[in-house]
Image (cartoon, rainbow, N blue to C red):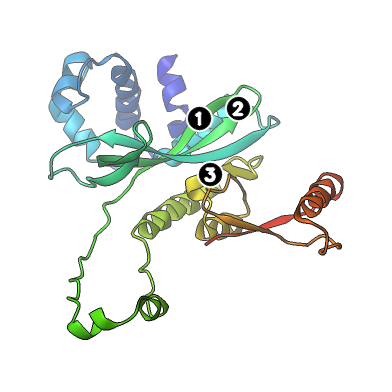
Amino acid sequence: MLYGYCTEPADKSGEFSKPQRQFLASLFVTLFVVCGKANFTNLSRYGEYSDRTYRRQYQKSFDFIPFHAQTIAAAIEPSREQIAAIDCSFISKSGKQTWGVDNFYNGSISKSQKGLEISVIAVVDMLAHQGYTLSVKQTAKTDRQSTPLAQPTANKKRKSKSKSKSKSKPKAEPVISERVKGYLEQLKTTRSHLPAAVKYLAADSFYSKKSVVDGVVNLDLHLVSKLRIDKEGVWGKLPPDTSAPISATATLAIENLKAHRVSMMARLI
């Protein structure tokens, strides 16, 4: 019975052979009971296969996204209200040989730390308050190209502060943009496997960027998030009485928002 439940999505696809389906059913059960690290040697102690079999089976490709999509479809009724959610998770890791080791934001300590990061897209059952993982992708290391700093000359030191401020060089594009491209690429790959009832994508304030909003809208989704404290927002349609004090204008805008659902356009910088 457990074998049929674990491999039913794989059986429907018809892309996996019977030995691989049997291996997957045994692997899923072994991962729940294994103690310690889930390496091939330790899996062979708790599973029914040798470490050579685990190594050979792990060399074969397996697309987990369609597998997870069919499993989620069996767990959630299509009539239920569902949304998608995206977030990143930090994994502590030291050393230099592991692929993807870089400085990532660790939410548990609220600062950047050396380790690994995975980006997770899940389907959330709003009635049961339960999330089901659909796609997991490891974040790649960002290549940082160091540029030598120019030494100030004597003439530059004599310039006034006003001139130096007016001729300041534009800031370079932040390194994080390359990671945002990776998140959008993962969302684009996963979009076709989301349930038909999913129309909204929930994310935290990190994703409240214009590039992310445009990418989500292009995939026929609506982003539900919040702005960071350093973002600026403007009303798409100003109230008619612009000469009124700020307090009265804000009150009028709130009343219009409640009564007529006035749309607010965020200018993300």
Question: Pointer 3: residues within 10 angstroms few (<14), some, or many (20+)?
Answer: some
Which label sits on residue 76?
2
Query: Residue 137 at x, y = what percent?
Result: 36, 44
Q: Is residue 84 left or right of residue 115?
A: right
Secondary element under disc 1, as helix, strand or loop, is: strand
Q: Is residue 146 left or right of residue 232?
A: left
Task: Using the image as rendered, state which of residue 114 and residue 240 is in the foreground.
Answer: 240
Q: Is residue 239 above or below residue 24?
A: below
Secondary element under disc 3, as helix, strand or loop, is: helix
Q: Is residue 111 above or below residue 19?
A: below
Question: Pointer 1: residues within 10 angstroms few (<14), some, or many (20+)?
Answer: some
Pointer 3: what residue? 193
Which label sits on residue 132?
1
Determine whether label 2 and label 1 are within 8 Å by CB.
yes
Q: Can I make out residue 71 in this image?
A: no
Secondary element under disc 2, as helix, strand or loop, is: loop
Whole-number angstrom distance, CA of label 2 to CA of label 3: 14 Å
Task: Classify residue 10 by image quadrant.
Answer: top left
Whole-number angstrom distance, CA of label 1 to CA of label 3: 13 Å
**What amino acid type should be assigned to the residue bearing mark 2?**
Ile
Question: Pointer 2: residues within 10 angstroms few (<14), some, or many (20+)?
Answer: some
Q: Is residue 223 left or right of residue 3?
A: right
